[in-house]
Image (cartoon, grey):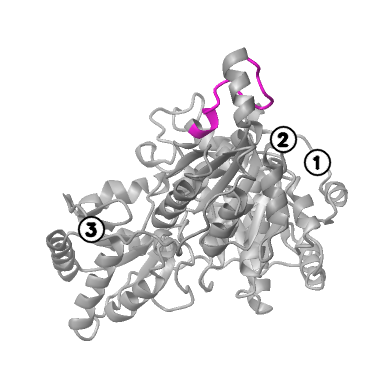
Amino acid sequence: MTVAEYLIARLQQAGLQHLFAVPGDYAGNFLTALDATPGIERIANVNELGCGYAADGYARFKGIGAACVQYGVGGFSVLNATAGSYVERVPVVVISASPSTGDRYLERTQGILFHHSTGDLLADQKVFSHVTVASVVIEDPETAPARIDAAIVAMLTHRRPIYVEVLQNVWNLSCASPQGTLAPIPLTSDPQSLTAAVEAAWARIQAARLPVLWAGVEIQRFGLQSTLQQIVDASGLPFTTTSLGKTVLDESQPRFVGTYAGPASPAITRAVMKATDCPIALGTIITDDYLDIMKSSFGQMIEVNDSEARVGYSYYHQVAMGDFLAALLAKFQSAGAPRAYELPRAEEEAPAAPQPGDSLTYNVFYRQLSGFLKDQGLLGKVTLVLGESTSLYVFGNLFGLPPGSFVGQAAWGSLGHETGCALGIALATGTRPYVVAGDGGFRMICQELSSLAEQKCNAVVFVMSNDVYAIEQAFVNIDAFQPDGQFAPFDVLPAWDYPALAKAFGARGYRVKTVGELSDVLNELQGVTDAPALVEVVIPEKDLAPQLARLAGAPPQTSKYHKTRPIPGSKQER
């Protein structure tokens, strides 16, 4: 067995069936071996960043993803995607190949700079060490199996990326065959610390007037959905999720009170989270969208995730999240019938029914698309993929979604992730991705439409077209959305012809401006099974969705970007 074959075998054992790749000469021997291996398919990408995004989307559902890129130029290009996977606990293998043993000798002794090298032969490994749980360079076929195994085990244990670089000439050298199978290292708790944490949490829950379960994405990453659902059933507690953890559980059940996104949340969610005197944050990655509740309720909060366990201001060391959930479930089950909790009342103002000739806005589009998916029975057949734009906070208001049907890179927030990861999601789930992207984000990764077309993936990419970085402008100076306001020059985009762009990349292209036009396109796309579609959704430049207005207009001490002084000339200053 060669080193290349060994790595492929271990990836297959971990569940990988598709590997995303942008070719490079250093990796040629690996890709040749990959194409000769049954049961795993190389998926071509046209952009390294898109390759990383696709692997990220795939791994969110399969538990492992892989991206192969060229050394140096490819590695640094995919680095952004890898950082996002690291922050959001997504297990991705970044595979790279670098100059051979002989080339390295010449570079060291004669100062020859081989292509794509910075001059530091360990530069890639050093950089990736900051956004992975293992970053290795394989130079010796004898030690290759042990080093590959250790890296993959680290990835499976921590649900975070790894970087594996192999010298060009080492790929085809012989090594030992795999022994046994790889598995995550079980996380164990200190029994006394676990007992103390659970007893403190239980006492706080029992004393609280309205405890609320607040679930995060780590529940899904570590396979704890069933345990959490049992806690919901046994406790009678209402539950919400973070934006990143949306659809970690079935959202059609009555105890779901909406996705919590700080001020951008639905009215009922805001009311419940304001009223709670015991937020129970389980598996959450708490971002600056939640500055308000962290300011108001830190001392009342129970917070248990992969890295810490605390009850109020007391921290408990070596408490595994899975053990904590199991012990908390046992408490609720032994307590008998669940308590009844009275929720505050809050209702959204019902919008007027749109007419076919009405223009589109973020919220009109949201209501039309979500209504269409519900009416057509498509909620379990599509995956909604939202970009770091206004659409994330608008579509985060949806109720009734089935488990695992919503993806948003809500912590790292890299523009373009939504379109780039669609192919990986489609291959991992078999569902049809419905992507909602801001035009600024889409433009950063638009060429991945070509990768979707190459695979005949029928993803639908809706581009909210207002020719500005609207979410950026809202946080820079929200007054720009006033009738007499002006957007900052750096937040204005040039005009693009999206239908023509779609045609160039092999996709179907559409442009919609009204409710009726959108309805016609949605119905037409039902019959499209062999090609992606790009739908330009034309909205006003100054369409400020109320969800974003509440988030960006939060008081300075709790706003997302920690504004400490008013923008010159803004209403705050005046």
Q: Amino acid at mark 3?
A: Val
Residue at the spot x=37%, y=56% of the render? 284
Whole-percent x and y of residue 260?
42, 59
Q: Amino acid at mark 2?
A: Leu
Q: In this rendering, does residue 391 appear at all?
A: no
Which residue is the site of mark 3? Answer: 319
Which residue is the site of mark 1? Answer: 496
Image quarter where the N terminus lies is bottom right
The kind of secondary structure the magenta stretch mainly shows is loop
Whole-percent x and y of residue 82?
54, 44
Residue nearer the viewer, 532 or 127: 127
Whole-percent x and y of residue 111?
62, 14
Q: In the figure, 7 relative to 468: above or below?
A: below
* Residue 88 within the segment the image draws in magenta: no
Residue neighbourhood size for the residue with mark 1, other residues' Cα within 10 Å, grouped as few (<14), some (14–19), many (≥20): few
SS category of the residue bearing label 1: loop
> In this picture, which residue range is highlighted in magenta?
111-125
Which residue is the site of mark 2? Answer: 493
Q: Residue furthest top?
A: 110
How far apart are labels 2 and 3 at the CA level?
49 Å
In the picture, residue 204 is in which quadrant? bottom left
Whole-percent x and y of residue 12?
57, 62
Q: Residue furthest bottom?
A: 337
Residue at the spot x=52%, y=49% of the render? 548
Q: In the figure, 199 relative to 89: above or below?
A: below
